[in-house]
Image: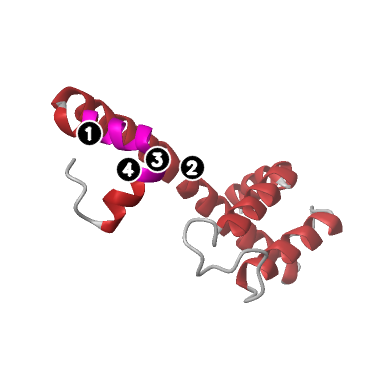
């Protein structure tokens, strides 16, 4: 890798091992192909994980709506309270990490979504079963 740009010079100076690894990858089709396969695999897993979270959050929204309209009452008030608290946090402009910060900006939202889903997982399952019976 020819160190022409400021970025190349910075990486070469402060992260020489990384620069060597990048040069190895660029010189080897096999290593680059392996890297690309690993990234595709990780992306598939990550995207699927968040797609599953998104679908489950939609269930939580339906569950809270059904509770609000008194169509569904087989849920604890603490589960409703936690659901509402986290949903409020997600739409709040005040974050632990502001959303405009690359990568970590949405991290707090993602962590809270995971926390919410873990805590009320059984409630979600019960609600989905109730929905099927309607």
Label 3: which secondary element: loop
Q: Which residues are magenta?
A: 12-24
- In percent of width and height, residue 56 lies at 57, 51
Would residue 13 be counted in the magenta stretch? yes
**Mark 1 lies on residue:** 23
- Separation of marks 1 and 3 at Cα, in angstroms: 13 Å
Label 4: which secondary element: helix
Nearest-to-viewer mark from 1 and 3: 3
Q: Earlier in the sequence, mark 3 or mark 2?
A: 3
**Mark 3 lies on residue:** 15
To which quarter of the image does residue 45 belong? top left
Q: Assign the N terminus to one quadrant of the image.
A: top left
- Residue 71 seen: no
Q: Earlier in the sequence, mark 4 or mark 2?
A: 4
- Separation of marks 3 and 2 at Cα, in angstroms: 32 Å
Would residue 124 be counted in the magenta stretch? no
């Amino acid at each position: 890798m020819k160190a022409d740009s400021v970025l190349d010079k910075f990486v070469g100076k402060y992260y020489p091992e990384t620069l060597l690894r990048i040069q190895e990858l660029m010189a080897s089709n096999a290593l680059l192909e392996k890297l690309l396969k690993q990234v595709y695999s990780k992306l598939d897993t990550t995207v699927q994980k968040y797609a599953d979270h998104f679908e489950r959050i939609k269930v939580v929204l339906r569950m809270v709506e059904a509770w609000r309209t008194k169509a569904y009452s087989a849920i604890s008030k603490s589960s409703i309270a936690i659901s509402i608290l986290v949903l409020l946090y997600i739409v709040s402009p005040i974050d632990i990490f502001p959303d405009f910060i690359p990568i970590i900006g949405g991290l707090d939202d993602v962590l809270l979504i995971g926390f919410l889903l873990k805590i009320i997982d059984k409630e979600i399952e019960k609600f989905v079963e109730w929905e099927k019976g309607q």
